Image: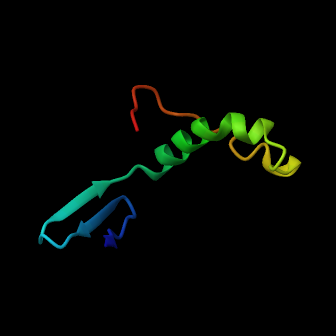
Amino acid sequence: MSWSPDGQTLASGSDDNTIKLWHFDLDQLIAWGCEWMKDYLKNSSSVSEEDRCLCDGVRVKQNSKP
């Protein structure tokens, strides 16, 4: 595996000699993760009070899919 210099593409190789390129919008991945974790962050007793707001202000872009 190797990341492109801009950090947006990952190249992976496998035993069958194929290479796959994976394009990532890292900001969007963070937004999707925050959307998925928001209830846990707000309600879990194992999350510290200072960490409950980690995703505040992070939003998923319109018309985007994971």
Question: Front-most of 40 and 4?
Answer: 40
**Residue 38 appears in the rendering:** yes
Residue drawn at x 13%, y 66% as measured from the top left: 18
Q: Nearer the viewer, residue 2 or 17?
A: 17
Q: Is residue 23 left or right of residue 29?
A: left
Q: Which residue is painted at 35% across and 70% down in the image? A: 5
x, y percent for residue 38: 67, 36
Q: Is residue 61 above or below residue 53?
A: above
Occupied quadrant, residue 58 = top right
Residue at 52 percent across and 40 percent down: it is: 32
User: Residue 23 location, x and y as percent?
Assistant: 31, 53
Furthest toward the left, the residue is: 17
Q: Is residue 11 above or below residue 58?
A: below
Q: Quadrant of residue 3?
A: bottom left
Figure check: 5 above or below 44: below
In the image shown, does 50 or 5 lie closer to the viewer? 50
At a point 12% along the width and 72% down the height, the residue shown is: 17
Drawn side of residue 27 relative to residue 50, left or right: left
Identify the image quadrant of the C terminus.
top left
Please provide percent x and percent y for residue 65.
Answer: 39, 33
**In this rendering, position of residue 61 left or right of residue 43:** left
Residue 56 shows in the view:
no
Quadrant, the N terminus: bottom left
